[in-house]
Image (tube, rainbow, N blue to C red):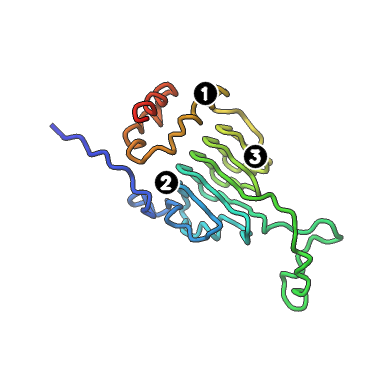
């Protein structure tokens, strides 16, 4: 009889986790910018140079605001984060950023300092982004949320919320308030890789009672 396969967690340090699929990259081993933090197993899928995520998908990132993405997030092709560096003055006759164009215009960089910002952009754990989703500066997306294809996310998204549209609106939540609280208390994304490996069927297709029982088994 065939022997059971050993329970070995996936390696979170491998850049391309799917054999034969170079379009998929784990983000944590890819990121070099100190302004971007990504949790283990979060991935980006793109047939066209996914390893350029930092420059092609995180735009106008001049700091000091950070982009923080949790663990186990799935980012579809073209998911983009617009950062606070995209801001322009709006209090004068023109919004054009003259000082950035060089020459003597650069003497007026003081006109671009102190522009209002919305702080860090924070994505929780286990968030799924559909193709072409765009997230505006300072948005906070809760755990377990789903961002529909083509969405423009301009405001915060609640835990386990499903949003869509331009601008994105809350379509519904995946669970009721009581069950969301239970899921947040379990916080399976903070389990060890070995614990996750042992309970993948429960995490993917079990109910919340099963998930709580799994959590209790190693507490």
- Image quadrant of residue 58? bottom right
Q: Which mark is residue 179?
A: 1
- Which of these two is toward me, 162 or 132? 162
* Mark earlier in primary sequence (2, 3): 2
Horizontal side, residue 191 vs residue 57: left or right: left
In the rendered structure, which disc, 1 or 3, sits on the residue that comes first in sequence? Answer: 3
Q: CA–CA distance between discs 1 and 2?
A: 25 Å
Do residues under tags 1 and 3 come within 8 Å of each other at their CB atoms?
Answer: no
Question: Which residue appears at 20% of the width and 34% of the height?
Answer: 4
Residue 179 image position (x, y, % from top left) = 52, 23
- Near mark 2 (Cα within 10 A), the count class, few <14, some 14-19 or many ≥20, is many
Residue shown at the point (52%, 35%) measured from the top left: 144
Q: Which residue is mark 2?
A: 41
| Cα gap from disc 2 to disc 3, whole angstroms | 23 Å
Image coords of residue 217 (percent x, y): 34, 27
> Which of marks 2 and 1 precedes in the sequence?
2
- What residue is rendered at 58% in x and 32% in y? 161
Please state which of residues 139 and 129 is positioned toward the viewer in this rendering. 139
Q: Give the class, few, some or many, for how many residues have Cα within 10 Å of label 1's Cα (few <14, many ≥20).
A: few
Residue 92 at what x, y percent from top left? Answer: 85, 60
Which residue sits furthest right? 93
Q: Which residue is mark 3?
A: 156
The quarter in which the N terminus is drawn is top left
Identify the residue at image location x=49%, y=50%: 38
* Residue 71 drawn at (x, y percent): 46, 43
How far separated are the C-alphas under marks 1 and 3? 20 Å
Tell me if mark 3 has few (under 14), some (14-19) or many (20+) residues whose alpha carbon lies within 10 angstroms of its own: some
Q: Secondary structure at mark 3?
A: loop
């Amino acid at each position: 009889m065939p022997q059971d396969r050993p329970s070995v967690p996936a390696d979170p340090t491998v850049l391309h986790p799917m054999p034969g699929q170079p379009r998929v990259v784990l983000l944590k081993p890819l990121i070099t910018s100190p302004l971007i933090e990504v949790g283990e197993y979060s991935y980006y899928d793109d047939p066209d140079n996914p390893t350029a995520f930092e420059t092609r998908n995180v735009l106008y990132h001049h700091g000091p605001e950070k982009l923080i993405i949790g663990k186990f997030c799935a980012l579809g092709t073209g998911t983009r984060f617009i950062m606070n560096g995209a801001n322009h003055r709006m209090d004068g006759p023109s919004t054009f950023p003259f000082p950035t164009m060089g020459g003597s215009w650069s003497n007026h960089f003081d006109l671009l300092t102190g522009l209002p910002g919305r702080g860090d952009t924070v994505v929780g754990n286990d968030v799924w982004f559909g193709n072409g989703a765009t997230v505006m500066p300072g948005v906070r997306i809760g755990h377990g949320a789903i961002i529909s294809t083509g969405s423009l996310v301009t405001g915060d998204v609640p835990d386990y919320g499903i949003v869509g549209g331009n601008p994105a609106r809350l379509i519904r939540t995946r669970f009721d308030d009581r069950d969301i609280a239970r899921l947040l208390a379990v916080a399976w994304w903070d389990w060890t890789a070995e614990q996750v490996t042992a309970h993948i069927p429960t995490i993917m297709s079990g109910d919340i009672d099963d998930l709580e029982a799994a959590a209790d088994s190693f507490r």
